[in-house]
Image (tube, rainbow, N blue to C red):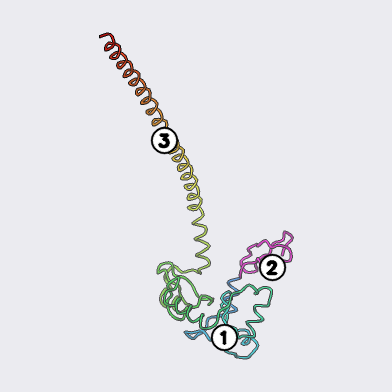
Amino acid sequence: SNNRGCYICPVCATEVVISEHNMSTLPDNAFAKRLSCPSTVSEKREKTCGQCKMSGTYVEANIHCINCDEFLCANCALKHLEQEETVSHKTQDMEEYQETDIKLASNPTLPRCCGFYDALDIGSTYCVDCEISLCADCHTKLHIDHRCAELNAISQNFEIKIKTPLKELQKDHQILHKALDFLENIRKDTSKKHEDVHKTVKQRTQVLYNLIQEYENMLLMEIEKRHANN
């Protein structure tokens, strides 16, 4: 890190601010991750423990780490979850992994070129023209003349492009909120006027009723007076 408390990426030179004695906030290095986990030539990945394989032994895996996308044996899975940097990782047994893998294969988030596609392969790209994820072979054989780029670069470009529409949407939200407040005030004012009209009508009706009552009493008194004189 430099004097400003920033870590400089050795690949892209991006500066990332880190807190003192805390490296967990550093983003994943996708380039290094791809190099550390190259694509396999087989259509299906080997279900062997990755940690044991690194030490030269081949042990059948029975646990899959969802965060690392790595196969582990029971012992390595236990150690994996005891380490500070991976203690919060989520794991699943192989039966659960197979079910998830089948669902993703039948309905992937992004269309894939073929069964050899591996998102962690360093040669994997995305064809913008065909809107499909490509392995290295399909890229060179079928999409070499198309506009292709890494998904990471496309996502970053999308983030840049969407900033302005998001700001405009935020402004529209504020304008709409003000308009709704204005309409609510009008509704309240209209409701008050409606109540005032009702009150006024009742008051005037009561006045008319009182006048009619007085006139009625006056006529009755006049009738009684004339009847008494006769």
List the residue tagged with mark 2.
23
Quadrant location of residue 81?
A: bottom right
Which quadrant is the C terminus positioned in?
top left
Real-space CA distance between mark 2 and mark 3, rounded to the nearest whole angstrom: 60 Å
Real-space CA distance between mark 2 and mark 1, rounded to the nearest whole angstrom: 30 Å
Q: Position of residue 75 (x, y in %)?
A: 64, 85
List the residue tagged with mark 3.
190
Mark 2 and mark 1 lie on one chain; the one further toward the N terminus is: 2
Residue shown at 61%/70% (left/top)? 28
Instruction: Please tell me whether mark 2 or mark 3 is closer to you in this view.
Output: 3
Q: Is residue 174 above or below residue 119?
A: above
Which quadrant is the N terminus positioned in?
bottom right
Q: Secondary structure at mark 1?
A: loop
Q: Position of residue 32 (x, y in %)?
A: 61, 74
Q: Secondary structure at mark 2?
A: loop
List the residue tagged with mark 1.
62
